[in-house]
Amino acid sequence: MANLQVISPARAVQLVREGAVLIDIREADEHARERIPGARHHALSRIDADSPARAGDNVLVFHCRSGARTKGSAARLASVAPKCETYILEGGLDAWKKAGLPVTLDRSQPIDIIRQVQIVAGSLVLLGVVLGVLVAPGFYALSGFVGAGLLFAGISGFCGMARLLDAMPWNRRTLSPAK
């Protein structure tokens, strides 16, 4: 089944009550910070290495933050659990929260790396523009350098800023949440 059926948060809750398993396909840093209670974590980056389905699983509901990553990976997700009935949570964790359903937020965990990259890159671009206007035009090069780095990251899949931020002391993870 290449296309998984998309279901609402209300339908997902109903299926979970009937024994379905929610599978969070976000990366570990995203899951550690905020998650649906009881959802099993199985990052999309390791989905091909081992199946998220376990013995006794009959129905799986995959989710990410917004639903886009899950929809974009529907064929892969369907292929790793061929013996299960599989669904995608429409709108992901964001829709779950919007529906007033419970989430666990652990503020002791750092925000996910991609958001940190967005914050730092945006700050550096803004700083380069402000300094370019107020101090000297040469500071525009900072904005250009950051833009080039983001372009390279998008093309190559390697983000040096993400690697650097991941090594920072505030990104040292505390105990992992239960899976």
Image (cartoon, grey):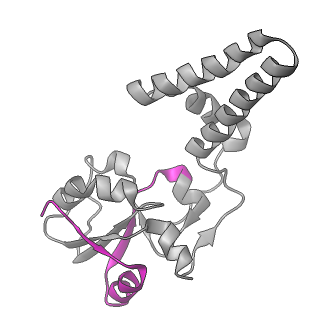
Compare residues 170 and 114 and report the one nearer the observer.
Answer: 114
Q: Residue at x 80, y 26 (%)?
A: 130
Q: Residue furthest right?
A: 135
Taking 86 as reference, is 110 above or below it? above
Compare residues 2 and 163 and report the one nearer the observer.
Answer: 2
Q: Is residue 17 left or right of residue 48?
A: right
Q: Is residue 99 left or right of residue 167?
A: left
Taking 174 as reference, is 55 above or below it? below
Estimate the x, y position of residue 91 in percent, counting from the top left. 43, 68
Q: Residue at x 60, y 28 (%)?
A: 161
| Residue 126: quarter of image | top right
Q: Is residue 57 visible?
A: no
Estimate the x, y position of residue 24 in percent, counting from the top left. 42, 63
Taking 115 as reference, is 91 above or below it? below
| Residue 80: quarter of image | bottom left
| Residue 103: quarter of image | bottom right
Compare residues 4 and 141 and report the one nearer the observer.
Answer: 141
Judge whether residue 129 is colored magenta. no
| Quadrant position of the N terminus in the picture | bottom left
Q: Is residue 45 visible?
A: yes
Q: Residue furthest front?
A: 133
Count of marks, rendered view: 0
Taking 36 as reference, is 119 above or below it? above
Judge whether residue 12 is colored magenta. yes
Q: Residue at x 52, y 67 (%)?
A: 94
Range drawn in magenta: 1-29
Estimate the x, y position of residue 101 in percent, counting from the top left. 54, 82
Estimate the x, y position of residue 119 in percent, counting from the top left. 68, 40
Q: Is residue 123 left or right of residue 14?
A: right
